[in-house]
Image: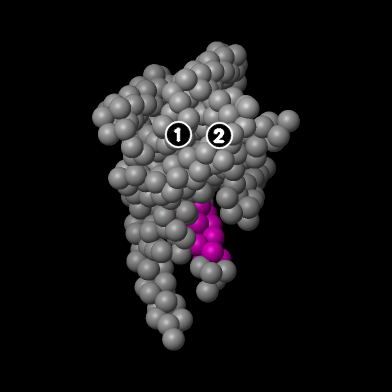
């Protein structure tokens, strides 16, 4: 059954997951473009996108050969691992146990490393390689998110639409502000995406095992709500214990 | 070669951050799959066990991370 809820949750999960990854790739491309020049930034980005497209064209059709239940089971388990990892990190970040990811810092670190290589004869090549690596690695994550959340019948197109919209929004924002997108609430996004991907993962794994979920696809929302309640309680409890710990450590 | 190694470790890093959490999730899925296929556990019961198991494993991983920090 393809309900509006399924389509919306697929597009949302794909959009938000891809958005976080594209912002990270954009930070590196911007660092290369501004600290070195735009030529290696664009060449590195273009080559990575070509390689990604080739990988999708080669391996994409193979997915169609895998029986749907096996595909849902495998993708489901991978989605649980992927989503729960993001969720755990986002909870620990929200409660102050680990530092928040900072795009300004990532931009400064990349710019610094490119400046150190400026005297190198291969400086342009190294700058292009940095952009290539960033786009390829983040791109692989985007491809995985699209394939994973689009594992339901007829959902791949909607998942691709979400990812394409995320790329478009980051490019438009990036061209407009010409700075790292540091105001994007990355941890909140990762928290929401972690919840969504874990819920999708549990749903697909269950489907792969032959479970007839009550309410069919709508059960994703119930799983999401349960995980969200647990996560919010965890953040509240951990914030309290972190505050108590900081107080106890004060001289 | 170095790039391929980085790419592989980055790809594995997509799924594994806390190694024990990843391992426990895989064990949970394997146990539920085994119970459904070999012990005739109803698949829906397996699905519910998966939901609850994931919640418990997430909480266990958080407690472990906090203990390590304190």
Q: Quadrant of the C terminus of chain A?
A: bottom left
Q: Residue at x 43, y 48 (%)?
A: A105
Q: Residue at x 52, y 32 (%)?
A: A134
Front in this rendered view, residue A229 or A30: A30
Residue B27 visible (yes or no): yes
Q: Residue A92 placed where, x, y %? A: 45, 60
Part of the protein shown in magenta: B53-65
Q: Residue A209 placed where, x, y %? A: 55, 36
Subunit that carries the residue with mark 1:
A
**Quadrant in the rendering for residue A245:** bottom left
Position of residue A14 relative to residue A46, above or below, is below
Residue A199 visible (yes or no): no
Residue underneath mark 2:
A118
Q: Label 1's element? A: helix
Front in this rendered view, residue A140 or A193: A140
Please tell me whether residue B62 belongs to the stretch shown in magenta: yes
Prevailing secondary structure of the magenta residues: helix
Q: Residue at x 40, y 45 (%)?
A: A103
Subunit that carries the residue with mark 2:
A
Q: Label 2's element? A: loop
Q: Residue A83 placed where, x, y %? A: 48, 44
| A95 left or right, relative to B57 | left
Residue underneath mark 1:
A35
Position of residue A230 relative to residue A168, above or below, is below
Q: Disc 2 or disc 1, which is closer to the eye?
A: 2
Q: Label 1 crowding class (10 Å Cα cut-off): few <14, some 14-19, many 20+? A: some
Q: Quadrant of the N terminus of chain A?
A: top left
Position of residue A215 relative to residue B62, above or below, is above
Please tell me whether residue A168 belongs to the stretch shown in magenta: no
Q: Residue at x 60, y 14 (%)?
A: A58
- Marked residue nearer the N-terminal end (2 or 1): 1
């Amino acid at each position: 059954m393809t309900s509006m809820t399924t389509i919306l949750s697929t597009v949302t999960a794909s959009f938000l997951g891809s958005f976080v990854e594209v912002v990270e790739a954009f930070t590196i491309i911007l660092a290369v473009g501004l600290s070195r020049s735009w030529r290696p930034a664009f060449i590195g980005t273009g080559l990575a996108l070509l390689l990604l497209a080739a990988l999708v064209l080669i391996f994409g059709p193979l997915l169609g050969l895998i029986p749907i239940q096996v595909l849902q089971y495998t993708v489901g388990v991978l989605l649980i691992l992927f989503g729960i990892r993001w969720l755990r990190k986002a909870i620990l970040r929200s409660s102050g146990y680990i530092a928040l990811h900072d795009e300004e810092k990532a931009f400064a670190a990349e710019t610094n490393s490119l400046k150190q290589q400026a005297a190198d004869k291969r400086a342009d090549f190294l700058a292009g390689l940095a952009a290539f690596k960033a786009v390829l690695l983040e791109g692989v994550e985007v491809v995985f998110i699209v394939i994973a959340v689009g594992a339901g019948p007829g959902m791949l197109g909607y998942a691709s639409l979400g990812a394409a919209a995320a790329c478009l929004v980051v490019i438009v924002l990036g061209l407009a502000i010409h700075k790292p997108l540091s105001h994007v609430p990355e941890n909140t996004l990762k928290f929401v995406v972690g919840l969504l991907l874990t819920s999708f993962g549990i749903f697909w794994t269950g489907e792969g095992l032959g479970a007839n979920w009550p309410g069919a696809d709508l059960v994703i929302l119930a799983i999401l709500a349960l995980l969200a309640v647990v996560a919010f309680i965890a953040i509240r409890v951990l914030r309290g214990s972190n505050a108590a710990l900081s107080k106890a450590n004060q001289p | 070669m170095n790039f391929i190694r980085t790419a592989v470790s980055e790809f594995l890093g997509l799924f594994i951050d806390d190694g024990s959490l990843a391992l426990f999730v895989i064990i949970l899925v394997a146990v539920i799959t085994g119970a459904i296929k070999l012990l005739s556990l109803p698949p829906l019961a397996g699905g519910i066990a998966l939901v609850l198991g994931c919640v418990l494993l997430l909480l266990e991983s958080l407690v472990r991370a906090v203990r390590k920090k304190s």
